[in-house]
Image (tube, rainbow, N blue to C red):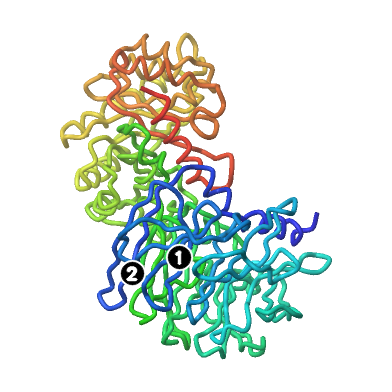
Amino acid sequence: MKFKTILSAFLAFAGTIALSAQQSSQVISYLEIYDMETGTHQVVKEFPFLIEAPNWTPDGKWLVVNKDGRLYRIAPDGSGELTEINTGAINQCNNDHVISADGKWIALSSNDPAQKGWNSFVYTVPFEGGEPKKITPVGPSYLHGISPDGKMIAYCAFRGPENEPDVYVMPVKGGREVRLTDAPGLDDGPEYSMDGKYIWFNSVRSGRMQVWRMKANGKDQKQMTFDKDMNSWFPHISPDGKKVVYIAYHDYEVAPGDHTANQNVQLRMIPAEGGEPKILVKLFGGQGSINVNSWSPDSRKFAYVSYRMAEELTAPAKEMAVQLYSARDLIGTPELFAENHEYVLERLSQMGYTGAEAASYADGRFSGMEPEDFKAVLNKAGLDLVSSHATRMLSKNELTSGDLRAALEWWDECIEAHKKAGIPRLVMSYSQKLDSEAELKVMSDYLNAIGSRCNAAGIRFGYHNHAHEFERIGNTTMMDYFITHTDPENVFIEMDVYWAVVGGAAPVEYMRKYPGRFEILHIKDKREVGQSGMVGFDAIFRNFDIAGTKGFVVEMEEASTPNILKGLRESALYLRNNIR
């Protein structure tokens, strides 16, 4: 199956009622209004179910939204309840509905219940309700615009032998449809300017989804946004013709041709003549938030919907930290951290994580930031810094000679930075595999010495294992030797339960064999926590008290999908719902 055919099938299914990504979990919807004069936004109504895609009526009296395949109206101040607009037998309306400039009728996209499969068509229906009239005889067709004179509709359609997705227009009374775009890839979201001279749309032709504009006859197609790290969708021009609001997705979360639900997205604005975008709102949403024009008639406000996934709000709260190394592809360098940390840290907090373990210390800084500043950005996102990973391994010469002076000087600087950041625990994240009991003794002395220095600074010191610590070295292992030859006052063990299992050990046996030594644990699985069945998490959590465990850190090396944040979310919900 060719890519364009796959894309066509995907979008055809996605356009009906709502994307399955949004439908897969119950959501809480927040109908919000943004005020251009004050630069503020407020929730006017909260719904314990999914609503999508608000329109503002031309007389300013109503907002029209989609719910469960039906259209409803509600006052813009949120007063009253949703009132259904009768659409007769057409009960699978999606997010694509637009009100005519005179306010007398609505055009909408919907699957035809009389036909098998998912295949959206454009219909019109009186604003007060009635039996819809089918306009487009062929599908898939996804409406986005009505000309100001009410004579034409603009829509994205999939046509031809390869189901090429392009912008089309046709008369409301029916007739021949006209294809306006023919660039490779997806062209979508066409919307008329209020003077009828232009059609705004979004196109992936440049490699990333961007906002474009063309004359109403399809001539002079011009790129209007040049976002370098975002995919820009659904441009909505204000009634006064001066401003364009659109929704932007982070390019590391979605492919250019996707506009999925349940993402942290931005509402951006550009002047109608083009220019640098201004970020108006950062929200959790995406599909359903602002698919269609939602400007107030006076161009002073616009409506949109933000969401929270109900299970993230209702799952039992649990004190749990996340190892920031898990999101290294998003925040693993100072440059990436500066660019993405606000989004990533906020999303982790939304998932239910309450703390974080750092993994970015270098030369007195964390992710390139001063310690105090690093702590501030974590705290702003609602995450406490519970611990930090750092390491300075011993060279072969140091292991042989036992001369630890240079290594401990490195740790003195490291400890000072962690003290400035207010991080209560410092964990040595890795040691190479050792070969002899003599090397084990030097390393144990090293750990004790670091721990003593940490104690003097008011910081607890720990050691984090991988799999090789459970391999035999004579009559012992690195793990057993470190536990029995370090002072519990100086050194705790942060056992990584997954690596212990990979190393052939049983985490619970170690917790019982060495009670009180495992102050924090790394809760990890092959991918998402609880996914593999390899690790007995229930038994591990039941033995926290005997192990002396005060908290745990979730880490993921990889997820089942390329989206690590999705994997971290699933891990958080698993722990919140299944582990007591």
Residue at left offset 55%, top offset 48%: 21
Res. 43 visible in picture: no
Quadrant housing residue 534:
top right
Task: Out of 400 and 143, give the one closest to the viewer.
Answer: 143
Disc 2: CA contacts within 10 A as few (<14), some (14-19) or many (>=20): some
Task: Out of 318 and 316, give the one closest to the viewer.
Answer: 316
Q: Amino acid at mark 1?
A: Val
Query: What percent of the width, then of the height, locates residue 55?
Result: 45, 69
Query: What percent of the width, then of the height, locates residue 151?
Result: 62, 84
Q: Is residue 270 left or right of residue 491?
A: right
- SS at mark 2? strand
Residue 64, disc? 1
- SS at mark 1? strand
Task: Out of 338 and 537, give the one closest to the viewer.
Answer: 537
Residue at left offset 41%, top offset 39%: 311
Query: What percent of the width, then of the height, locates residue 319?
Result: 30, 33
Residue 34, disc? 2
Task: Out of 568 and 286, give the one closest to the viewer.
Answer: 286
Front position among marks 1 and 2: 1
Q: Is residue 341 left or right of residue 457?
A: right
Q: Amino acid at mark 2?
A: Tyr
